[in-house]
Image (cartoon, grey):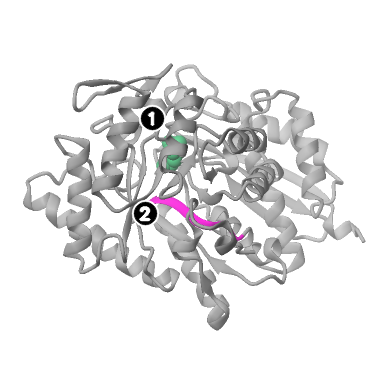
Amino acid sequence: MTTRAHLIDQVTARRVWDSRGRPTVEAEVRLGGGAAGRAIAPAGASTGSGEAVDLRDGGAAFGGYDVTGAVRHVEREIGPALRGHDAADQAGLDRALADLDGTADKSRLGGNALIAVSLAALHAAAAAAGRPLWRHVLGDRPARLPLPEIQIFGGGAHAGRRVDVQDFMVVPVGASTFAESLDWTADIYRAAGVRMAEAGRLSGVADEGGYWPAFDTNEEALECLVRAIEDAGRIPGDEVAIALDVAASEFGSAGRYRLGLEGRDLDGDGLAELLIGWLDRYPIVSIEDPLGEDDARGMQRFTAAVGDRVQIVGDDYLVTSARRVERAARDGACNALLVKPNQAGTVTETRAAFDAARSAGYGTIVSARSGETEDVTIVHLAVGWGAGQLKVGSFSRSERMAKWNEGLRIESALGDAAAFAGRAALGGADPAARSLA
Ligand code: 2PG
Ligand code: MG
């Protein structure tokens, strides 16, 4: 039953700043009963062309990245339209947002405006119910903390294209709790830093907090990562495995790829062969966007070749779209979905993509963006939806640590009831073993 207490009374927005020092949209939703919710839109750098579009002002201010237009849309159009809407009816509210925008890519009001409001409304509904967001979303089902993918070296568009591969990550597959997975990662992150320093190559961090990738080849970064896992006293593969985000759309299109670091031009088969060579030589359990977003044939062939032994994640390729997930599942491309709420533009559309991935037997990884803030909503979604995996960047910089730390808080709140998703959460593994929530 709806009471006035659950009805949206006011929606406001302001310009705040993200981890790259760029403007972004923060929205607040206040309900009649006084409960309120707040959320901040993140922003990508290696964006898929099918994503919801962030509305930026252009022009001279802040390099064209300003968001005064998106903020104004929340205040003048979205707020009045949502007034009186039931905050507990997320699907209806998100439909109203999408209808009001009226474009396929959310470009009129701005994907940044829409996702901030949609998430803020979810927060307000949880606050009105008097429950943490993760519990509000999960209900009474058992909770499971996600297996983290944590970046150790940044690259690609997040590091001036210093190396071609975008994310070199660790996955603590042998850990028995979320907290332990972070303990291990802290040691590996530190060990990697010591190695870089000893080699005279420590020169700060990339956009998501991973070390700046001062390597001569992409493969050298993989070798250094394996050594850092060993230096930290962990067994590569058994205890801590590797995940890559190749983000191939950033260095290739129409089936042609240019590895800038190594000065090599490859076709799709050539790139697949190179990556499969790495799978043979290194303990890699997950590989994201191995081929370009426009290379459906390449993705299908790659999945057919190695999808039974490794997780193949669609990020730019699937852009958190239920329609694209269904098509990929039909065509035999990918076996896991990267779930980024701002790619879809609303909570409900994100959830639809998530559900499509689940139905297809895919693994699911809730993910942050390279431009982030102190907002930790995605951690609550990862637990609340039973996603099984979480990717929020590296193990430094507070916009990243805020999220890992929120996972620790949820794990402590659960006490003995806390379960950890572990290795079984990886796509490509038996979907029955992944039935998490
Ligand atoms: C990705 C993300 C996060 P961006 O490609 O998976 O690493 O990067 O937010 O720049 O798209
Ligand atoms: Mg990616």
Front-lying residue, 67 or 415: 415
Front: mark 1 or 2: 1
Task: Answer yes or no: is residue 126 visible.
Answer: yes
| C-alpha distance separating marks 1 and 2 | 19 Å
Which label belongs to residue 150?
2
The disc labelled 1 sits on which kind of residue?
Answer: Ala
Q: Is mark 2 on a helix, strand or loop?
A: strand
Location of residue 183 (image quadrant): bottom left
Q: Between residues 339 and 407, which one lies in front from this camera angle? A: 339
Magenta region includes residue 357? no
Residue occupying the far bottom of the picture: 416
Instruction: Pick the quarter of the image with the N terminus.
Output: bottom right
Question: Looking at the picture, how far across and down is residue 133, in whole percent?
Answer: 65, 62
- Please tell me whether residue 204 is drawn above or below residue 345 in the rendered image: below
**Residue on which disc 1 sits:** 248
Viewer-closest of 40 and 179 = 179
In the image, 46: left or right of 11? left
The residue located at (57%, 48%) in the rendering is 362
Check residue 390 for magenta coloring: yes
Q: What range is drawn magenta here?
A: 386-393
- Badge 2 residue CB within 8 Å of ligand 1: no
Q: Quadrant of residue 432?
A: bottom right
Asked whether residue 80 appears in the rendered view, the answer is no
How many marks are shown on the rendered structure?
A: 2
**Vertical placement of 433 versus 371: above or below?**
below
Say few, some or many: other residues with alpha carbon within 10 Å of mark 1 (under 14 / 14 to 19 / 20 or more).
many
Give the mark, 1 or 2, whose residue is nearer the N terminus. Answer: 2
